[in-house]
Every structure is written in structure tokens, then in C-alpha cells.
Amino acid sequence: MEAHKRFKFSSLEDLQTELNKMGIDFPLVEDTNALKQPLRIGKNIIPNRMVIHPMEGCDGDKEGRPGELTSRRYKRFAEGGAGLLWFEATAVVEEGKANPRQLLITQNTLKDLAALLQEAINAAVNKNGSDRKPYTVLQLTHSGRYSKPVSKPQPIIAATNPYLDGKNPAPKQIITDAQLEQLEDRYVAAAAMAAEIGFDAVDIKSCHKYLISELFAAHTREGAYGGSFENRTRFLLNIIDKIRTKLSDDIDVAVRMNAYDGIPYPYGWGVDEGDCHRVDPSEPVRLVKLLGERGVNLANISSGNPYYNPHIGRPYDFGPYVPKENQLYAVERMLKIARDIQKAVPEMAIVATGFSWLREYGAACAAGGIRDGWFQLAGFGRQSFAYPNFAEDIIQTGTLERKKCCIACGKCTELMRLNSVTGCVIQDAEVYRPIYKKLTQGQPSLVGKEIADHV
Ligand SMILES: Cc1cc2nc3c(=O)[nH]c(=O)nc-3n(C[C@H](O)[C@H](O)[C@H](O)COP(=O)(O)O)c2cc1C
């Protein structure tokens, strides 16, 4: 297997040659027009196929209201011309915040979230015209084992997990069935508030081993939310059923879900029972079909756990450890998972993840996947921090400029782990470089030299 390497490609042909050599066959096309096409979703039109993934800046105030840097980020995203703005993880209850500055949706913060949304829509329409109004999704979350509402971790877990427990030594509280049932209603209340302020959709966040993602693999949990497939997916499906009953068609429901955890069975989801390095899409596919039956028409597919195996979901050149596998295998895995899911639910709009590490060739890869029906929308995460107007550049010129691209240096994640506000230290240096320099004194804290043996 090819080892982990720094990005080195100087042309699309160069990249294609490497893919051929490695036996990787995801599509790359020079013609990026597929990304400009609108897409109908329910009663709305998404003006193009490019999505800003949910990306937390950890820059809200203590009450969970957006701060100045939050407004700045969404204005830049909105002006950048992507057809879909997927607003970041926003907690539904205080104790489920992943960091003290995560956004929170309550009656106290609603006015400010409404202003954030309206400013973003106005910025997009003023810059790009009313026919380019983006579709907007608000991601609702409970951080589960990664909850840290004040300065110390306060994990609330679905089940014990030998692979993850040791990574977070704080005392853990197993959430009870009665608490889960109550929490379902908090998601419904949050969805009602999101509808009231004008979001097109809410996402019931089910990825990255936060609470719902952990429940999917809670084979060892007893009671109504653990063990069987029906029990492990009950919490998510109950929330969606309750939203539908209460809100009818007032708001669309979307899901960002892990389709592969990369953690050994029975503690990981979407993994082969005998080898966690192999994907077994059968349960994620079964779930996505149930979502389709409930009217969910948008799903954003992700993988991995940013705390345990970040190379799986956000391939990097520099990160907390050196993975064994080459980044192109991680990209391939993410694209093929999206393809398998899209095939199972052809009428659902699937958003794929995995383009930022490819720099400017992310555009060719996104367009190739859409052309070949692997997925209908392409989501960009770190690239949108680095290059917020990447979509507009693709629309205007068909391509991206290397010098503006994300370099997968891991510094945005590092800032987050240092309990700081975060953004792109390299391409948005005016704001984030001084913050990074001050916190690290020029010595990156998370750049691992060791080859990881746990993944
Ligand atoms: C700083 C940072 C913040 C993130 N915040 C969120 C989030 O709020 N919700 C979420 O689902 N994913 C979040 N992600 C994951 C990204 O949405 C995306 O899945 C990941 O970066 C891989 O995509 P990329 O290769 O395009 O960056 C975050 C990632 C980073 C680096």
C-alpha cells in the first residue's frame, strides 16, 4: 500500500497517472460545467452543485450567539457563490455543546441566529443576484462523548467504547432512555425555531461519533436505544417522525451521517465485522432508505472521527499523527461510500465529502462524480475556510487557483483543539495567523511525527 505523502501533483494528468498506478478509479474531468447546474430539492432550487460543509469557527459568545467572526465567516461563504450553505453544528441543549463557544439554539439566541441567516442571504443575493439565493441548512447537534460546554470535557455517552474511552479520561455519564426521549423533543423544538427564522432545512447531525453517530454503533447498550439495528437508529428516526408530525412541511429535514467510522466492530458503524479497514455499507444503506421513506431528500455523507482517526474524514498533509495509508485512499473511500449510498436512494440528493485535500483538482473530482452519477452535490470543508469564493471562481473560470487553496496543513483543527476560535491560518492570515502564532509560539502542537498504530 502506498504510504502517506505530501501533495505533489502539478497537473490533472499527473494526478490521473498516480491514480492509475494506485488502482484508484474515481472520475476526474476537466470540464467542470456539471458543478454549475441547478438542482431541484422539494419546493426549492439549489442554484449550483457546490456546498459549503458545516464548519465550526468556535467563535460564538458564552450564551451560544454568533460573534463577529461568525458573521464575517458566513458573509464570506455567502458571497462566495456556493449553492448550499450548510450552517455549522449548533447545539440543541447547553450540556451538548462541544466547546464553550459553540452556537446554541434557544429562545435567547434565536434573534441573533435569524440575523446571521438574513445577513448571509442578503450578502449572497446582493453579490450574485436573486436567482443565486443559496439553500440553507442548520446543523443541529448534541456532542455526546465530546461535550465540553465549559472549559472541561463533560462526556455524555451512549455506550462505553474501548477505542474511544481512554482518549477522553473525564468521568462519563451514560445517557438514559428517558433522557434520550426528552432530548428528542429538544431537537423538535430546535427544528421549530429554525423553521420560524427561515432556514430551508435542519440537519439532525449523525456523524463523527457525536451522540447520534455513537448510538448507531451502540450494539452493547441495553434497552430501547441499543442492540438491534431498529434500536440503534430509533433516536434519529423518532426525531424525524416527531418533526414531521409537528411541523409538517414547514421545513425540510436533512441528515449529515457517518457511513463509515473506521473503528472496529461492534464499536464502529459501517465497518466490516472482521476488518474495520473495510467498509460494510449495508446498515448505512438500510438507514438511508428509511430516511427516504420519511421524506428526507438531502443527506451529506461523512466518515471517521476527528478525535480518534481524523485522517479518514479529513485527509491531511500534517496532523496529529502520520497515518499508514496514502491520502488518496481516504479520498477514494469517501467518494465510493457516497456513490454506494446515492445508488441506493437515487431520488435523494447526496452530498459527497473529500475534495479539499485535492487542492484545485477537487473541482475536477467533484464535477466527475456528478457527471457519473456518484453523487449530486459536492461539499467543501477546509477549502471553504481557505478559499470562500471557490464556487464563484469555478463558475467564472471553470477552475480553481492553486495559490488560494487549502493546503491541508491541519492548523484549523489545531486551533480548535487549543480551545481557540478557528479559521484558515494560511489563506486568511490577517485574522488567524496572529492567533495561531500567539498560541503555539511558532511550535505547532499537533503535528505528529509518529506513524499511528491504532488506526
Ligand atoms: C475546523 C473544522 C470545523 C468543522 N466543523 C464541523 C461541523 O460543525 N459539522 C460537521 O458536520 N463537520 C465539521 N467539520 C468537518 C467538515 O465539515 C468536513 O467534513 C471535513 O473537513 C472534511 O472535508 P474537507 O476535506 O473538504 O475539509 C469541521 C472540520 C474542521 C476542520
Image (cartoon, rainbow, N blue to C red):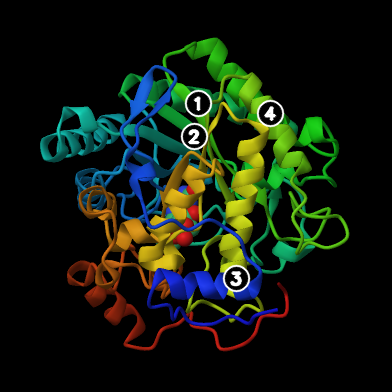
- Secondary element under disc 2, as helix, strand or loop, is strand
Between circles 2 and 3, the one closer to the viewer is: 3
Reading the image, the residue beneath label 2 is: 203
Reading the image, the residue beneath label 4 is: 289
Q: x, y (%) of residue 429?
A: 22, 72
| Neighbourhood count class around disc 3 (C-alpha, 10 Å): few under 14, some 14–19, many 20 upward | few
Q: Please state which amino acid type lies under the numbered disc 1.
A: Val
Q: Please state which amino acid type lies under the numbered disc 3.
A: Asn
- Secondary element under disc 4, as helix, strand or loop, is helix
Q: Earlier in the sequence, mark 2 or mark 1?
A: 2
- Secondary element under disc 1, as helix, strand or loop, is strand
Query: Contact, CB < 8 Å: mark 4 with mark 2?
Result: no
Between circles 4 and 2, the one closer to the viewer is: 4
Q: Earlier in the sequence, mark 3 or mark 4?
A: 3
How far is disc 2 from disc 1 in space, using C-alphas?
A: 6 Å
Q: Please state which amino acid type lies under the numbered disc 2.
A: Asp
Q: Is mark 2 within 8 Å of ligand 1?
A: yes
Q: Residue at x 43, y 56 (%)?
A: 29
**In the rendering, which numbered label is found on residue 253?**
1
**In the rendering, which numbered label is found on residue 20?**
3
Q: Earlier in the sequence, mark 1 or mark 3?
A: 3
